[in-house]
Image (cartoon, rainbow, N blue to C red):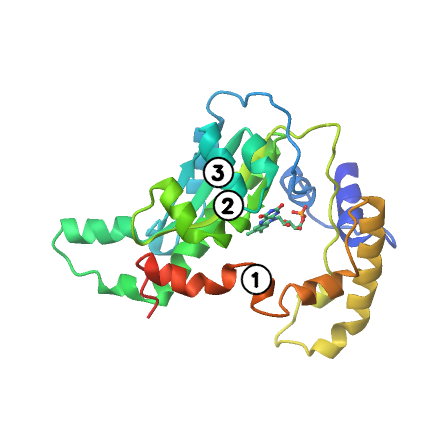
Amino acid sequence: MSERGVAHFGERYGGEGAAPRFAQWNEVIASLLGHRSVRRYIQKPLPEGTLELLVAAAQSAPSSSNLQLWSVLSVQDPDRRRRLAELAGGQAHVRDAGLFLVWLADLRRLGDLAKHRGAAHEGLDYLEMFVMAVVDAALAAQNALVAAESLGLGTVYIGALRNHPEAVAAELGLPAQVFAAFGLCVGWPDPAAPASIKPRLPQSVVLHHEQYGAFERSVGALDAYDRLMDGFYTKERMGVQGSWSHHSAARVASAQSLRGRDRLRAALSAMGFALK
Ligand SMILES: Cc1cc2nc3c(=O)[nH]c(=O)nc-3n(C[C@H](O)[C@H](O)[C@H](O)COP(=O)(O)O)c2cc1C
């Protein structure tokens, strides 16, 4: 395990105890463990071909039945970026990042292909196909993210595009049965505002063996994670109100806590997804 890997592992889990020893280790894994979302970018152009390189990485992700039920849309126009930033709750990084990519769950292309061939396409009306498209889009996007980070670029996903799905669809000229699942900012991180590795839950909480373990077995570890995150919020001066448990529970307290996304099913229906 490299020094960089030991450091990343420590930050990911809070750094207590001896560094683990893994029989296998490489720089790909070090890069994965070093992930952190970047929300401050400098205005330096990306190297030529970056977009195409990231799309090649994205297309190299597995795809369910190789149906490739996703598309990606790159937005460069500054006015459109500004409007999307507002639709995403006023997130300045949507405006400022070198690249802004919108990852689309795309059932349209296969429907059009079937129509073009005079074939039936009723299967596209089922929830299963929507899930397949969103999973495919997420896997593709994450491959692009990993590729970008391996080049020293910073990234952050923008799920807030789902706050106003119809307005985003209109802004991007999306046809029926194409859904903007989330955005991704890519750019050169601002060295004046470095992002830190954010700790994750202990493995004992997320890793089950053979059968799903009861919640009670995790209570102590969740308390420990709250303490770890309290320290992280203070160190990073994040001004978070309450513990991780507190604000995570608040995020699902009511329909209103979903900040407009509680009406996603209705929005998807209006956008041509039958979700049977
Ligand atoms: C699907 C998805 C949507 C996200 N949406 C946003 C967003 O709209 N704005 C934002 O600042 N961060 C967003 N994030 C980033 C998460 O807040 C971030 O990944 C999480 O806090 C963990 O921090 P880390 O990525 O630095 O490890 C999103 C992440 C994912 C996976």
Horizontal side of residue 229 vs 67, given as left or right: right
- Location of residue 256 (image quadrant): bottom right
Classify mark 3: helix, strand or loop.
helix
Horizontal side of residue 133 vs 261, given as left or right: left
Horizontal side of residue 139 vs 64, given as left or right: right
What is the three-letter code of the residue carrying label 1?
Leu
Picture coordinates of residue 200, whole percent (x, y): 72, 55
What is the three-letter code of the residue carrying label 2?
Leu
Q: Is residue 247 above or below residue 208?
A: above
Residue behind mark 2:
87
Asked if the residues shown at circle 3 and circle 1 are in contact, with their CB atoms under 8 angstroms apart, the answer is no
Q: Nearer the viewer, residue 113 or 30?
A: 113
Q: Residue at the location (45% across, 56% down)?
A: 135
Most extreme residue toward the left, as rendered? 118
Q: Can see residue 104?
A: no
Residue behind mark 3:
83
For label 2, the crowd category at 10 Å Cα-Cα, with few meaning under 14, some 14 to 19 and many 20 or more, is some
Q: Quadrant of the N terminus?
A: top right
